[in-house]
Image (tube, rainbow, N blue to C red):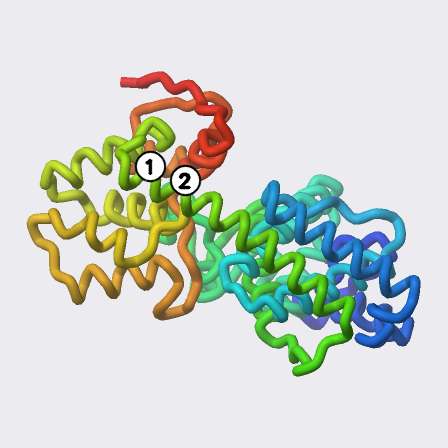
Amino acid sequence: MTSEQLRVILSSEDYARYPFLPEALNHLRELGLTLEDLSSTSLGAIILSRAKDRLARVIESSTYPLPDEDYRAEIAAFYASLLILAGISDQRLTEKFAIAYSKNVHLFLKQEVEKGNFSKLFYIAHHLLGWRVRQVGEGVMVHFSDYVQAQPEYVGPWKLVNRLVDRGYVFISWQELARLLETGVRKYVVSLVRDVNVPTSLPENVYKAVEEISAAWSSRQHDLRAIARTVYSEKKEGMLPPCMRELLRKQSSGENLSHSARFALASFLISIGLSVDEVLDLFRSSPDFREDIARYQVEHIAGLRGSRVKYSPYKCDNMRSLGLCRWECEKVSHPLQYFYRAARGRVPSSRELW
């Protein structure tokens, strides 16, 4: 399949599942809905309410609800959500929304692969994201530059040295392309929010929605930061996953942690709400600590430098493959999942594997 051969038929269900597609936005334009309509019409009120509900769910549970049958309202709610996010202008919340939303997209694309429908994956990859992709036999090839920008992990089978590469193209399966597209869509949604032109004067109901969601997000962040700082300052390390407790112990005792261990610890502490300076204070006990280098690295992890993308800590499987974890925690696949459950008073049980 090449770009010249690409033929894709999009249904109303697709518009609800993938409202970021230009074709879905065209349907929204056909409604003639304006910014003022969000504040002055019953339809606008429904759309705004739906957008707020979706954003509230992202804040509370890190999930984006599955679309319903009213695809036009679903598209409108998606773009109203982007407007609210742009009005709040908080990179962390935008990233959280994009992550939750892109996970749904990954689910839908996996279903397409299971049905043998590959055209939508190819369409999103090539037409929307501009990736260089080619169908080869039962699989697909993606240019290495697009691959490395979207690979979900930098260890194990995703590591580029472990892939078959031919003349700049990486061989992958369609399921793997679906996973790469999750990352691609996440970044695309972030760019959509960044490109929203927020008027200096918003309609009253829209302004109230921005304030309401902003307040909910600030409250949530304050709660988690308060918990994180309590854990950090009062040494209540039982709320941290055992892998992070062990890394903290080693760091505090002056051991020279590996690069991957430092990344895992720094990205985890940044993710639960500690500041760059608080993380730097922790690493000052490192035998080879240099303020300038350490600050650059931590700020890069926090998304304050370079690509401006905030890095997530390794998943549990990656921690084990790197030799940074020897525990198995009940129903936990990510260190942040452990912390959030513990923060709600449900500390997961753990057992040591070796």
Residues at circles 1 and 2 in contact by the CB criterion of under 8 Å: yes
Quadrant position of the C terminus in the picture: top left
Q: Where does the image place residue 323, in percent across and percent down from the top left?
A: 26, 33
Location of residue 253 by image quarter: top left
Q: Residue at image x 86%, y 69%?
A: 27
Residue 227, label in figure = 2
User: From what the image shows, is residue 304 above or below residue 289?
Assistant: below
Closer to us: 42 or 23: 42
Image coordinates of residue 349 in percent, x first then y, are 42, 19
Q: Is residue 324 left or right of residue 104?
A: left
Q: CA distance from mark 1 to mark 2?
A: 6 Å
Residue 201 visible somewhere in the drawing: yes
Callout 1: SS? helix
**Which element is circle 2 on?**
helix
For residue 133, which quarter of the picture? bottom right
Q: Which residue is mark 1?
A: 231
